[in-house]
Amino acid sequence: MVDHTSVLDDTSPADRLVMTLRGYGRTLVAFSGGVDSSVVLAAAARALGPGGAAAVTAVSPAVPAAEIDAAVDFCTQLGVAHHTVTTRELDVAGYRDNGPRRCYFCKSTLLTGAVALADAEGFAAVATGTNATDIAAGFRPGIRAAAERGARTPLADLDLDKPAVRDIARGWGLPTWDKPAAACLSSRIAYGVTITPARLARVERAEAALRPLLAAYGVRDLRVRDLGDAVRLEVDQPAVATVRDGPAVCSAVRSAVRDAGFADAPLTVEPFRSGSMNDLLRDPERWR
């Protein structure tokens, strides 16, 4: 009898991932266009052939149009089918209210649609890009929602963290290998502030205007945080002082944010920190 565990131990992380996906059968990948789901999709294509793998992307006011376009381009280059599902998370009160379980309702709508599509199209599995770093982060209600719907998590199951995923993507020549993280637009809105299409749209407009403006200053990671009655712009630490205090860039930033729909809301500039909105969850009294 072959000891499959020892075989996996002797192979590279990339090969282990491909071997894992091969065992799933035809696989539909919940595809955001980021590095994690792109690696899972590429692994599925390598394991099962282009006809054995496909992607599904949510279409929603919370998903930037540029990200959907990038997802389509990636699938075209990879040679796999790309599907979309129109998610209606804004119809769900628990999502609109923007409490601590917002991501649960979001993932529920996407994965419910993905599972229905998989059943209709004859896919044996639905997989996500959840990695080991996500699991270690702790409070991730979206992961629970995906698990409840039977989604597979090959990256996490193989204990592949974010750096390992980027290494695989770079080794395979995927254009997403160094793509900055890009969570959904709702993650920019402070917990407790009602999510509306207008709020999502103004965040998207502000970030779209600021990215090319601030790229000249070396900014790659950027978030516009809607705090309800104020705005927080987060950029890479080395650029904070320039963006906050440089006369020309500071004026341009304020104009871009105002024109995006934030009017004269107070604006602060701070270092980028993924998941910084979760700081509000540390106040239990707020969520009683």
Image: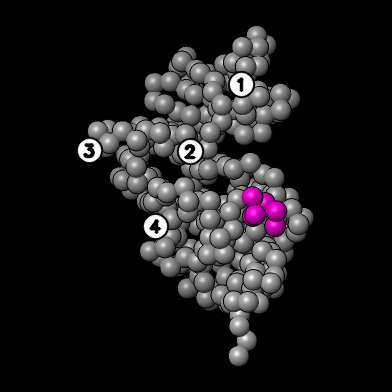
Residue under numbered circle 3: 288
Q: Earlier in the sequence, mark 1 or mark 3?
A: 1
Residue 103 location in percent, x, y? Answer: 41, 48
Which mark, by number, is residue 267?
none
Q: Quadrant of residue 7?
A: bottom right
Q: Residue furthest bottom?
A: 1
Instruction: Say few, some or many: other residues with alpha carbon within 10 Å of mark 1 (under 14 / 14 to 19 / 20 or more).
Output: some
Residue 75 location in percent, x, y? Answer: 68, 58
Give the quadrant of the N terminus: bottom right
- Amino acid under label 3? Arg
Q: The magenta stretch spans which residues?
A: 163-168
- Amino acid under label 4? Arg
The reply to whether discs 2 and 4 touch (Cβ–Cβ < 8 Å) is no
> Helix, strand or loop at disc 4?
helix
Residue under numbered circle 1: 240
The residue lying at 62 percent from left, 86 percent from top is 2
> Helix, strand or loop at disc 1?
helix
Residue under numbered circle 2: 275
Residue under numbered circle 4: 144
On screen, residue 232 versus residue 65, left or right, reads left
Q: Residue furthest left?
A: 288
